[in-house]
Image: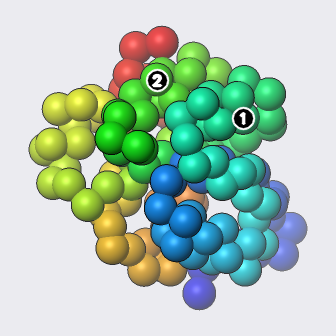
């Protein structure tokens, strides 16, 4: 299992997903790995508020929240230079047509998938996929 190694920094991870079971699973897996979850947010408004007010190291955004794209939250995170990925059951090409060149976590995902993408987000220099 991947997780926070001895001496490694605990991350604050924003989770946005309107499906309570998925959000809860992400929260549990991230906390079990030693990270702190910001949220989880179940609406775009909640995610925008958290993106504006909280310290966030990385974010995992559901592509579609309450039948609306989460591009506004992605743009806000890009403006703050916070790395994020889009979590979706859609094909990667469909996600990229809406969000640009962005990291993607496919639903359904496993524990290692989730923790690997979080690790990847912290180890890469991010460029904005969505214009701020």
Q: How many marks?
A: 2
- Answer above or below: position of 77 versus 115: above
Who's the residue at 33% across and 41% down the image?
A: 67
User: Residue 120: x, y in percent?
Assistant: 50, 55
SS at mark 1?
helix
Of the two numbered discs 1 and 2 on the same chain, state the one appearing first in sequence. 1
- Answer above or below: position of 128 versus 2: above
- Report which residue position mark 2 lands on: 72
User: Residue 4: x, y in percent?
Assistant: 74, 71
SS at mark 2?
helix
- Answer above or below: position of 99 versus 14: above
Who's the residue at 50% across and 80% down the image?
A: 111
- Report which residue position mark 1 lands on: 50
Q: In the picture provided, is 44 more to the left or to the right than 131?
A: right
Assign the N terminus to one quadrant of the image.
bottom right
Question: Disc 1 and disc 2: Cα gap in Å?
Answer: 13 Å
User: Residue 122: x, y in percent?
Assistant: 60, 49
Question: Of residues 104 and 3, which is closer to you in this image?
Answer: 104
Q: In the picture provided, is 27 more to the left or to the right than 115?
A: right
Residue 24 placement: quadrant: bottom right
Q: In the picture provided, is 72 more to the left or to the right than 36?
A: left
Query: Residue furthest toward the right?
Result: 7
Query: Residue furthest toward the bottom?
Result: 1
Q: How is the image coloured?
A: rainbow
Question: Of residues 49 and 97, which is closer to you in this image?
Answer: 49
Who's the residue at 30% across and 31% down the image?
A: 99
Task: Tell me the tag on residue 95.
Answer: none
Is residue 83 among what the camera can see?
no
């Amino acid at each position: 299992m991947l997780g926070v190694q001895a001496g490694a920094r605990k991350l604050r991870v924003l989770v946005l997903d309107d499906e309570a079971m998925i959000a809860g699973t992400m929260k549990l897996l991230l906390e079990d790995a030693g990270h702190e979850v910001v949220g989880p947010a179940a609406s775009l408004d909640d995610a925008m508020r958290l993106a504006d007010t909280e310290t966030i190291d990385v974010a995992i955004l559901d592509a579609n929240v309450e039948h609306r794209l989460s591009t506004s939250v992605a743009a806000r995170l890009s403006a703050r230079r916070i790395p994020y990925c889009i979590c979706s059951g859609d094909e990667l090409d469909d996600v990229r047509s809406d969000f640009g060149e962005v990291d993607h976590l496919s639903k359904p995902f496993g524990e290692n998938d989730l923790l690997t993408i979080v690790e990847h987000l912290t180890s890469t220099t991010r460029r904005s996929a969505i214009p701020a």
